Amino acid sequence: ISFGVSKRGRNWQSTNLALQKALAKHQSSGLADAARAYRAILKRQPRHPDALHLLGLTAHQTGDHVRATRHIKKAVTLRPKEPLFLNNLGLAQYAAGNLAAAELSFRRVLAISSENLPTRLHLGTVLAVQGRDEEALAEFMALITDGQPETLWHAKAGQALRQLGRLEEAEAQFHSASELTPQDVELLASLASLIQVHGRNRDAIEMSRRVLEIRPDYPDVLINLGNCLIMVEEIEES
């Protein structure tokens, strides 16, 4: 989540001791105390947008995503063009399983702030979860094109490409991701699996062994390695 108060509220916050104290509790993981403090502020000022937003965040962080959505929506009603509120509203809606609403919230952020890379990642993720892999891929590729290289962006693009059956392109993205974080066993395992799907069993064996050097008890990789070894043995015998 994006944590804090909106830009418009920061100057006001500096003179508001109650909100400062509540935010300090929130940032130190005192969520219950912070929530009580935000409610006390809202009892005096029911239309305080930052208090509503932050109260919603405490609910989101404790798993009550429906309540979080309700509070953050009220903050958005008061400041409908605040990207921070809209982004966190989308995250709460996504966590609550309301994918269409989350998509709309993320698109509203990007309409206001098109360079907001975290929100673009969230939008791509929501699209991918809905099976809209072509649209998701467009968002992930925009991140790769416009921003500094990030492991997650390449991995997300690779997964979308794999879902679309564009396996060579998917492999290239997973390679890019693994170059950025070469000890990430999940990435290496995905790459090994993808190479196996290509039928390149010897390469898959090599990649699987790299994974097992890092995590010797990785069940899926052990199974895939066994299958690859059987395939290579059968080819050599034929």
Image: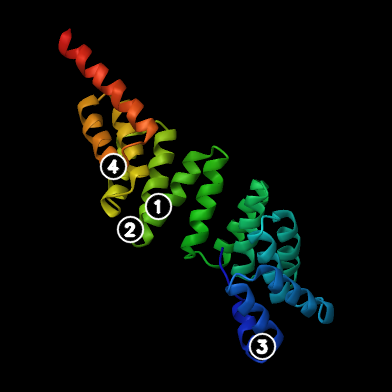
Q: Closer to the camera, 143 or 36?
A: 36
Q: Position of residue 145 (x, y in %)?
A: 35, 56
Q: Verify CB contact (< 8 Å) between mark 2 and mark 3.
A: no
Amino acid type, residue under disc 4 in the picture = Ala
Which residue position is annotated with label 1?
Answer: 153
The image quadrant that residue 200 belongs to is top left
Image vertical order of residue 98 relative to residue 38, above or below: above
Which residue position is annotated with label 3?
Answer: 12
**Circle 3: element type:** helix
Whether residue 33 is visible here, answered yes or no, is: yes
Which residue position is annotated with label 4?
Answer: 172
Furthest toward the top, the residue is 238
Q: Position of residue 31 (x, y in %)?
A: 66, 68
Q: Verify CB contact (< 8 Å) between mark 1 and mark 2.
A: yes
Label 4 crowding class (10 Å Cα cut-off): few <14, some 14-19, many 20+?
some
Mark 2 to mark 4 CA distance (whole Å): 14 Å
Q: Residue at x 28, y 38 (%)?
A: 212
**Circle 4: element type:** helix
**Circle 1: element type:** helix
**Circle 2: element type:** loop
Mark 4 to mark 3 CA distance (whole Å): 49 Å
